[in-house]
Structures are given as structure tokens and as C-alpha cells.
Image (tube, rainbow, N blue to C red):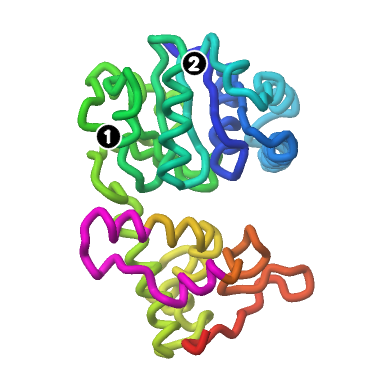
């Protein structure tokens, strides 16, 4: 059923999604409005494939075959004429996603499934601006996409069973483990994860403990691979804030209200690894050292 895949967005999630589709043998069109973002995304895919070669998980030939299956486009209309599936992986912004879904619906073949990698925004809402709500679905991949096995498959209110079944089985072809989830704010992964991260930030904000201490408690005490503050830096503090805002607006429950420290850090441009500084400093001179934020910030 699926041969030609379009991925919209060449950032961290988009290039990872393009990577796994191409590595599984699909023809992939990677779309971004920025040629610079496309070049960076393709370079990231090549670098990640090099790591796989170094670990003997793939061969040099497989790497070359994977890269040959990816074509880059700056115009959506040039990429979608033969698309069987489009996966939107743009910034976690509702208005932007609604605009992209309208364009996807207008330009894509009538049988094409429209998927989104959103981590929190309503699938039903995005489907409502299309003429094919039965063919709109969520495919929430985890970061880093080539390594993480989970994909949340999220049904919109009008998603058809045939659409769901096709995407569920496709996820298995990619070597992923699909999990069925219904369309409520944050789905499962972020509805559970983000309040934990937010509470870790609140502990710092209230002076309960420092950055490294909070992360150490969760790593050594709860067997988490990384602490909540380090994980927030990895995800992106702006992304964490956006998801918490979706949860807060969706449930009107104060337990989802973003910590004021998180809000201030994002306003100040401290977004984690992507900006070079968050709860930790990722600059070359101070890589992985703690940034001494306290409740005064």
C-alpha cells in the first residue's frame, strides 16, 4: 500500500522519521521551507547512518542505499503528487499545523493518508480542517527516532479502522512497536512524562535541591536513564512548555500549569541542547556542567 512517503520538517524529528522510512526501503521526500534546514537534516541522517555502520548494525552499502532513497524539496507541491503517506513533523504549534494540514489536504492524492508526529495536539482538530478526516492519524515517534522503538498511534474521532490498521502495520515494518492511543491532550507519553518534568523544575524553583541532585535522585533512585532536567534539555524546554500549555488548556487542571522558572527560561532563550544552554551548559568550554539557576531566576 505504501511506497512514497513525504515527511514535512527536516528538524530533529523529521530527519529521524525520514531516516527510518528510507532505511526500511521506502522512497522519501523530505520537505522544509528552508534549504539550510534540509542540508542540516540530510547531514544528520548521514552522520547517524555512519554511527550504525560503526556499530556493524548496517553496511556501507545499506547506508548508500538509504541516502539514495531520500530527496529534498522546499515546495510541498513538488513532493506530494504521488504520496501514499505524508507525515507532518513541524514545530509544535497549533496554527502552523492547521495551515500545513490544509495544504496537505489540498495538494495530496485523495487516497493519501495524512499523519502528524505531534506530541500533544489534537488529531481531531487537525482532521477538522481537511476533507478527509477518516484518513488523518497521529504517528508520535520518540526521540531519537532511529533508536527508540515506540510509536504512539493516535486515533482522531473520525479516523477510520482501515487507516488505523494500515498505519499500525506500517509501524511494524519500520521495526517499531506501535501502541494504540485515543485522542486526548498529551496522549499517554506526554500526559505522564511532562508533569514529572514540570515537578522536577518546581523542585529546583522552590529550592528543594539543585539540578544535578534532582537528576541523580531520579537516575539512581528510580532507574531512569536520565534525570528530568537533563531530559527536558534534550527534548527542548520550549517543546516542554508548549506541551504543558496544551495539557493545561485541555484539562483546565492546575497540576499541568508550567513552572514559572520554565516559562522564564524559554523567554530568555534558554531552550536546552538546541540553544546551547538550559539546566546544563552545552557550550564547548562548559559542556554538561550545571547552570546555577535558582528560584530567583
Disc 2: which residue: 107
Q: x and y percent of residue 19 in the render?
A: 60, 32
Tag 2, which secondary structure?
helix
Q: x and y percent of residue 161 in the render?
A: 22, 20
| The one of 149 and 127 positioned closer to us in this rendering | 127
Q: Residue at x 48, y 31 (%)?
A: 100
Q: x and y percent of residue 30 in the render?
A: 62, 27
Residue furthest right in the image: 285
Q: Which SS type dominates the magenta stretch?
A: helix
Which quadrant would residue 114 be assigned to in this image?
A: top left
Which quadrant would residue 111 be assigned to in this image?
A: top left
Question: Is residue 210 part of the magenta span, yes or no?
Answer: no
Q: Nearer the viewer, mark 1 or mark 2?
A: 2
Q: CA distance from mark 1 to mark 2?
A: 20 Å
Relative vertical location of residue 88 with respect to residue 239 in this rendering, above or below = above
Q: Residue at x 48, y 83 (%)?
A: 213
Residue 149 visible to the viewer = no
Q: Residue at x 59, y 21 (%)?
A: 28
Magenta-drawn segment: 244-267
Tag 1, which secondary structure?
helix
Q: Could you classify mark 1 by the number of other residues whose Cα lies within 10 Å: few (under 14), some (14-19), or many (20 or more)? A: many
- Decide which of tag 1 and tag 2 comes sooner along the chain: 2
Q: Residue at x 21, y 57 (%)?
A: 251
Which quadrant would residue 204 be assigned to in this image?
A: bottom left
Query: Label for residue 124?
Result: 1
Relative vertical location of residue 133 with respect to residue 284 in this rendering, above or below = above
Amino acid at each position: 500500500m505504501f511506497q512514497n512517503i513525504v515527511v514535512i520538517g527536516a528538524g530533529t524529528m523529521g530527519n529521524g522519521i525520514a531516516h527510518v522510512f528510507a532505511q526500511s526501503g521506502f522512497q522519501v521526500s523530505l520537505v522544509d521551507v528552508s534549504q539550510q534546514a534540509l542540508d542540516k537534516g540530510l547531514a544528520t541522517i548521514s552522520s547517524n547512518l555512519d554511527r550504525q555502520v560503526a556499530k556493524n548494525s548496517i553496511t556501507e552499502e545499506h547506508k548508500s542505499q538509504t541516502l539514495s532513497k531520500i530527496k529534498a524539496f522546499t515546495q510541498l507541491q513538488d513532493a506530494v503528487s504521488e504520496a501514499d503517506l505524508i507525515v507532518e513533523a513541524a514545530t509544535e504549534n497549533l496554527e502552523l499545523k492547521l495551515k500545513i494540514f490544509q495544504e496537505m489536504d489540498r495538494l495530496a492524492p485523495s487516497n493519501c493518508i495524512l499523519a502528524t508526529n505531534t506530541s500533544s495536539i489534537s488529531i481531531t482538530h487537525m482532521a477538522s480542517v481537511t476533507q478527509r478526516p477518516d484518513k488523518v492519524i497521529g504517528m508520535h515517534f520518540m526521540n531519537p527516532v532511529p533508536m527508540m522503538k515506540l510509536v504512539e498511534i493516535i486515533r482522531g474521532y473520525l479516523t477510520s479502522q482501515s487507516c488505523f490498521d494500515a498505519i499500525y502495520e506500517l509501524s511494524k515494518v519500520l521495526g517499531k512497536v506501535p501502541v494504540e492511543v485515543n485522542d486526548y491532550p498529551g496522549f499517554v507519553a506526554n500526559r505522564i512524562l511532562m508533569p514529572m518534568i514540570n515537578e522536577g523544575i518546581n523542585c529546583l524553583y522552590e529550592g528543594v535541591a539543585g539540578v544535578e541532585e534532582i537528576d541523580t535522585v531520579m537516575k539512581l533512585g528510580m532507574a531512569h536513564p536520565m534525570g528530568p532536567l537533563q531530559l527536558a534539555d534534550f527534548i527542548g524546554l520550549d517543546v516542554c512548555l508548549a506541551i504543558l500549555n496544551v495539557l493545561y488548556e485541555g484539562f483546565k487542571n492546575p497540576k499541568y500549569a508550567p513552572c514559572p522558572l520554565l516559562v522564564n527560561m524559554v523567554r530568555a532563550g534558554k531552550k536546552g541542547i538546541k540553544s546551547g544552554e538550559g539546566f546544563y551548559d552545552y557550550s564547548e568550554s562548559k559542556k554538561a556542567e550545571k547552570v546555577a539557576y535558582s528560584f530567583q531566576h
